Amino acid sequence: MKTYQAQFPWVLRALNRLGALASGMGVDLVGLDRDALLKRATAAAGSSDFGGDEFVGNFDRLLTSLRNEGKLTTFGRLIARTDLLRTLQNRLQITALCAQHPDIEAAPVSQPIFVVGPPRTGTTIFHDLLALDPANRVPMAWETAYPMPPPETATYNSDPRIARVDADLARVDQFIPEFKKMHPMGAQRAQECVSITSHEFASMIFNTQFRVPAYEDWVMEADMSAALRQHRRFLQVLQWKAPGQRWALKSPQHIWHMDQLLKEYPDARIVQTHRDPARILVSISSLVATLRGLASDAVDVAEIAQGYSAGLALGYRKMIEVREQGLLQDAQVIDLHFRDFVSDQVGTVRRAYQHFGLQLDTVAEQRMRQFLDDNPADKHGKHSYNLEDIGMNENDIRQQFAFYTDYFKVAQEPLKQ
């Protein structure tokens, strides 16, 4: 079975050893206390108005899971605390801005495109291609990490936050170089909705980064209404001074909460991606194990696979319920299969546009083709994985997901890569 170990410099290895010794004596070098984090965030933001306190219960669940289940190294606790403080400060600053400018929340978010489907089904590259159409406004990694002050059209491609986020991501590449083979990142690449809903602390981004099984179980079943309201407000802030014709968004999390997404965005256009669940499971377990190795030196890929297997089955059942209940109209959704996307990526995007009555012009198509030429799948090396890595039986996996593959007519793939 594979092991997943980050490549840390000696100073971080020493910090983790020191932290382990201190923890053994009942001392945490990096605290994850709710009240202390809230106090520090309000001091940094210069505001104490979080825009309601619904998020506090979510925040508590996450912190409890991080402390009790996370198996975090000292560096891992530092990563978690830094991310949580940044997120709290963003929320405070956005709340203050909207209080000063109520017209921001009055602006429409009309007919957004949502690309939904589990990781490893082509959603990332599909979203990247949508970003190349000037008619689409996508949330970029830099502006979702640091949304304040709101981005402006005039400086959108030269904002200093771009360099800041690229520097942050370069450090991730340094510590876990394997990760860019699986999921290339960049400040000016499209970012997922999970980065936005993290501001309500109701997001699957946390269980991708950290071992938080109790929190993960809660997120899959939670009511996302408040998180989706925050999601809309976040988009309204981003579009305030850097508008676009329509939003093009993406997140795997929406398959668990499609009914709630449609309540917040009843005119949404849904692109659902499909792939052999067995192949998804092997690949995503490898990705998550690699990423969690940044914050923990006790990563169990088989445990990750077991948890994600149960969770993915739940998500698929919820999505099928939405279809069976007629909550998604045929004109509102298109199903795209990974095998078709691989064979003709731009053509698959064109199919989606045609389904929604949109026009893909020649300039956008040329930009998409150039991006694909410049960014082949193996640009940073090949992501290698196989079934033995996760310690599960192929027949058991296929039986578990037969209800889904039969419903959507999903083809099987070989499990070695």
Image: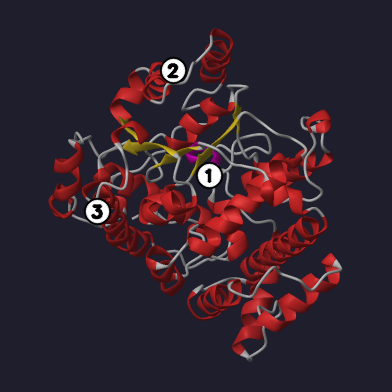
Residue at left offset 75%, top offset 44% = 167
Q: Mark 3 — residue?
A: 321
Residue stretch rendered in magenta on the structure:
179-183
Task: Return the residue at label 2.
Answer: 346
Locate residue 146, reporting x and y percent: 74, 50
Residue with the mark numbered 1: 179
The amino acid on which the numbered mark 3 sits, given as a three-letter code, is: Glu
Q: Is residue 396 shown above or below 375?
A: below
Residue type at mark 1 is Phe
Quadrant position of the C terminus in the picture: top left
Q: Nearer the viewer, residue 254 or 243?
A: 243
Mark 3 surroundings: few (<14), some (14-19) or many (≥20) residues within 10 A: some
Q: Which of marks 1 and 3 is nearer the N terminus?
A: 1
The percent position of residue 51, horizontal first and vertical second, equals 69, 68
Q: State left or right for residue 26 relative to residue 348.
A: right
Which amino acid type corresponds to the residue marked 2 in the rendered image? Val
**176 or 288: nearer the eye?**
288
Q: Which of marks 2 and 3 is nearer the N terminus?
A: 3
